[in-house]
Amino acid sequence: MSSTGGETSKMNSFVKKVKMGKRVEKMMKDKSGTTTGQEIADDDPNKTPEPYTCTGIFEADFTEFCRRNHLKDNEIPAVVIRPKPPGIQPPPDAKSKDSKDSKDASKDPTPDESPDTGSQEDPPPKTYVTKEKYAYFRPVIQVEMENDEKPITVTEIYIRGWKIDLLMVGIFKQCWPTIEKLSVVNLWNVNLSEAVIKEFASFLPQCPNLKTLAIDGTICVEESWALLIGEESLLTSLSLRNNGITDKGAAMIGKALSTVKTCNKNLISLNLSGNKISDIGATSIAQGLRMNRALLSLSLANNNVSNEGAKRLAEVLSRFPLTHEEVVERRKLLSEKGSPDRGLVKSPPPSRRGDNRPGSVRSSSHMDKTDKKRDKSSKKKQDGKKGEKEKEDTRSIRSSADGKKDKDDATKGGSKKDDKWKKGFMKASIAASIVADTMTKTKGKKTSSKDKRLPESDSPEMVEAINPLLEQVENMDNQLWIPGNRCMINLNLSRNNITEIGMKSLLLAVQYQITLLNLTPSPALKGILRMSLNGNAVKKTDETFMKLQEVLLTRDPYYKPPEKGEDNQSLAG
């Protein structure tokens, strides 16, 4: 019995130990489960991270947003400083060299007879840079800064040869508006889609100083480039070279430049060279130039423009008839503005009056009626109270003040659409006058960095803006004709298919601008100053082509006429 009792006690103790061990294991599992759950929660990619505030340093902000979008470190494009060509060191000054030699001689009267000149000379600059294998093909963002030691001073961004998708443009949307000094963005061969272009157009106006955008060598199937120059766009220079733009894209660009009711008021330079624009596209762009008075430079070089496109552009530069839609809009603007020649109160013409009385003299019957009305009104006024008279006086004063405001607004004129158009014209007129003045002043002179700024006395005067629809019209053949676009100063039509017929149209347009400028001189409306026509389907010995070149040569601001002494020497030789 004693043996069996000992065995049972041993069994009971063993069972208790097993149960305790199971409890401990269970507790350990629970603890380990909670820790692994926390680790999984910390590494959960779906967990929303804390909000990040941009610092304005492009490299740091760009890297952080790439990591937050679950890009690996080897997938994040590197931000590097754009390489620059090696500069040429200026030769040492002879005076400083002599003074340095004299100082060295005074310090050491017995210099070495054979100095080691090879160690003092700088090594020649390299024109190449060695990189690792496949490093050239990795995506890189090149930047230029005002000060290389301060990464917050990024001014230009360059992207070359890699696709920008929606994810990357979303990162740019968060980074670029915080870069205060960003003024230039240059993209080449980046394969943009319509959705990406829409994203660019949505946030580029938020960049305060971004004025220049170049997207070259990039094909977009939808050709939705016009979204970049909408009404909210702040770009002053846009380059779309070698993008395969056809007449479809040119039509959208022409509508973005201007319509009857809208116009782009900021774009000054547009480069569409190296595309597939034909006469139809050139006509669409010319249609956009009818109401646009902000664009100063247009390039359609190396396209498929022929005589019909050249005629349409020449028509816009000289004069053109208004369409029915433009005539209706002109009447609306005149009604909103109010004609200054007409009074607010119109009197009937003399032919409609029954007799030959002047307009200020009334008939006797009319005076009798007014006298009776005055008697009745005087009796009612005497029965009234003084408080009502005071109220009427205040009302009359307010109404007279409102009437004066309305008259002032009518005489000053202008609707909100007209004010929007005026802002763009004022910018373009100031820019054109600055360019023309600086060009004419620097004829035959070497410009320096100090001469780039104009003195206060030479600053251009503000020119009163006139909507093209409100200019003086000329009635011919039952049509209203207005002067054409004289704000554009540079037109590039080189390497196209223009023949003698198109050259005649362009010559007539330039001659018309010259005669109009002589009749009504204006500092902001000087017309075409440069026109590039080389490489077209016309011989250089053609009479019309040579005459057009002679006229343009005299209008070129950099043209320097030969002096009389030089002519005499050439004749004597």
Image (spheres, helix red, strand yellow):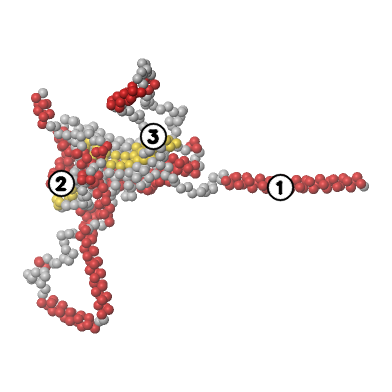
Name the kind of residue labelled 3 in the image: Arg
Q: Position of residue 503 (x, y in %)?
A: 18, 37
Please name the residue shown 13% across and 79% down the image: 368
Whether tag 1 and tag 3 are in contact, CB under 8 A, the answer is: no
Q: Quadrant of the C terminus?
A: top left
**Alpha carbon distance from label 3 to label 2:** 46 Å
Q: Secondary structure at mark 1?
A: helix
Q: How many marks?
A: 3
Residue shown at the point (49%, 36%) measured from the top left: 74
Kindly state the secondary structure of the residue where label 2 is placed: loop
Q: Is residue 350 above or below residue 482?
A: below
List x then y, in percent, for residue 135.
45, 30
Q: Amino acid at mark 1?
A: Lys
Residue at 18 percent across and 30 percent down: it is 540
| Closer to the eye: label 3 or 2 | 3
Which of the 4 image quadrants contains residue 355?
bottom left
Tell me which label, 1 or 3, sits earlier in the chain.
1
Kind of residue sitting beneath label 2? Pro
Q: Nearer the viewer, residue 35 or 202?
A: 35
Decide if residue 287 is in sight here.
no
Q: Nearer the viewer, mark 1 or mark 3?
A: 3
Residue at the left extreme, as displayed: 356
Q: Is residue 385 above or below residue 445?
A: below
Residue 429 visible here: yes
Toward the top, the furthest residue is 113
Tell me the residue that label 2 is attached to: 521
Q: CA distance from mark 1 to mark 3?
A: 62 Å
Tell me which label, 2 or 1, sits earlier in the chain: 1
- The residue singled out by tag 1 in the image is 26
Q: Which residue is mark 3?
A: 82
**Position of 121 relative to 328 (above/below):** above
